């Protein structure tokens, strides 16, 4: 693969030092944050489903096209949030053991149809271990013009439109699983019959409630359309691809979200992405604490931090990144 010159320009690093050069006392303080957070995870999972339920109830009783469109977006954003929660379990940050994987599959993975804890672990843990190399499935799949930044408004609009029309669904499915399983990241998977029974029971409950119209309109439709566009946006916020051998800080922006960003499109601190790659054993709720420690120690160049989604969108569409 040949990269054009403009594609291999790394991001101005928002961090003044790499992880290996951190002072010992900073590493020690941050490493105390490593561990599971089952209570916070469970609460976030509950809030996510309650939000979905209340939104769908509102749409079903409002009889308004505008409310329905709003609810489709709300549900899509929370479907994406379920994916982020599944990502936490892939790193064993929610629950320990095979039963934890099963619980997260039942409540976050299987409802999304195309993703499981054990399947995504193959892809995502390979991404962490073989970062931006030929063995990194994310890097291989996202190297190309569709993932180049900056890009033109017309090109980005075309990509988002294909997502909204569900035309990239097969690519999404392929990107969430490995063609060849990686034995080192293998974990227990329930029998296929268990998952089929899950869907049969779910279908029976929906039929008994006469709720197929609601499920198709406010679950399947967002999943096949808006959620796909949001997943693209989330991936753009994680890394700048098409780079040759960059460090984590040179390829991963820090986007500090405004309160309205977190309300409209919550992402469990995923936009503090360099810290997640440095310490994948730290739960999402503590990543903001890591950022605070870096700031306190003068290790963050705030001029190179994106403040809010709008600031990052301007970079995606051609503006120079902060501090460049």
Image (spheres, rainbow, N blue to C red):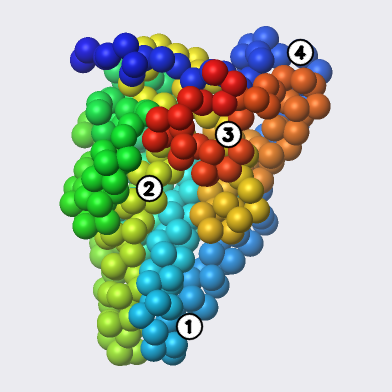
Rendered location of residue 261, percent (x, y): 57, 52
Secondary structure of the residue carrying numbered label 4: loop
Nearer the N terminus, badge 2 or badge 3? 2
Q: Residue at x 53, y 49 (%)?
A: 267
**Label 1 to label 3: alpha-carbon separation:** 35 Å
Rendered location of residue 4, percent (x, y): 27, 14
Q: Is residue 78 above or below residue 230?
A: below
Q: Is residue 89 above or below residue 72?
A: above
Rendered location of residue 34, percent (x, y): 67, 34
Please identify, in this view, whether the residue under mark 2 or under mark 3 is nearer the observer.
3
Please identify, in this view, whether the residue under mark 1 or under mark 3 is nearer the observer.
3
Secondary structure of the residue carrying numbered label 1: helix
**Label 3 to label 4: alpha-carbon separation:** 25 Å
Nearer the N terminus, badge 1 or badge 3? 1
232 or 313, nearer to the observer: 313
Proximity of marks 3 and 4: CB atoms separated by less than 8 Å: no
Q: Residues within 10 Å of mark 1 (few under 14, many from 20)?
A: some
- Residue that carries the numbered disc 2 in the rendered image: 231
- Residue that carries the numbered disc 3 in the rendered image: 306
Secondary structure of the residue carrying numbered label 3: strand
- Residue that carries the numbered disc 4 in the rendered image: 23
Q: Residue at x 67, y 22 (%)?
A: 301
**Label 4 to label 1: alpha-carbon separation:** 52 Å
In which quadrant of the rendered view does residue 257 lie? top right
């Amino acid at each position: 693969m040949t990269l054009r010159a403009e594609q291999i320009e790394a991001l101005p690093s928002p961090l003044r030092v790499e992880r290996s050069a951190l002072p010992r006392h900073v590493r020690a303080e941050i490493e105390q944050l490593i561990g599971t957070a089952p209570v916070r995870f469970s609460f976030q999972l509950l809030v996510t489903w309650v939000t979905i339920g209340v939104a769908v109830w509102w749409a079903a009783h409002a009889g308004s096209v505008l409310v329905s469109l709003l609810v489709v977006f709300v549900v899509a954003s929370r479907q994406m949030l379920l994916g982020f929660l599944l990502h936490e379990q892939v790193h064993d940050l929610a629950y320990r053991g095979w039963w934890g994987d099963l619980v997260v599959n039942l409540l976050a993975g299987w409802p999304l149809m195309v993703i499981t804890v054990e399947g995504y672990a193959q892809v995502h843990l390979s991404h962490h271990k073989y970062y931006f190399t030929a063995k990194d499935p994310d890097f291989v799949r996202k190297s190309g013009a569709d993932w180049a930044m900056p890009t033109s408004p017309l090109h980005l609009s075309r990509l988002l439109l294909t997502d909204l029309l569900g035309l990239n669904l097969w690519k999404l499915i392929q990107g969430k699983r490995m063609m060849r399983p990686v034995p080192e990241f293998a974990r227990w998977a329930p029998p296929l019959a268990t998952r089929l029974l899950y869907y049969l029971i779910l279908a029976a409950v929906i039929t008994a409630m006469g709720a197929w119209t609601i499920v198709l309109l406010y679950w399947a439709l967002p999943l096949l359309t808006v959620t796909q566009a949001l997943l693209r946006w989330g991936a753009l916020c994680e890394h700048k691809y098409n780079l040759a051998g960059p460090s984590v800080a040179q390829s991963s922006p820090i986007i500090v979200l405004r309160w309205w960003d977190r309300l409209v499109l919550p992402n469990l601190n995923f936009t503090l992405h360099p810290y997640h790659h440095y310490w994948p054993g730290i739960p999402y709720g503590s990543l903001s604490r890591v950022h605070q420690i870096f700031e306190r120690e003068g290790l963050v160049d705030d001029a190179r931090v994106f403040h809010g989604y709008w600031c990052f969108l301007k970079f995606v569409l051609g503006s120079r990144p902060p501090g460049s």
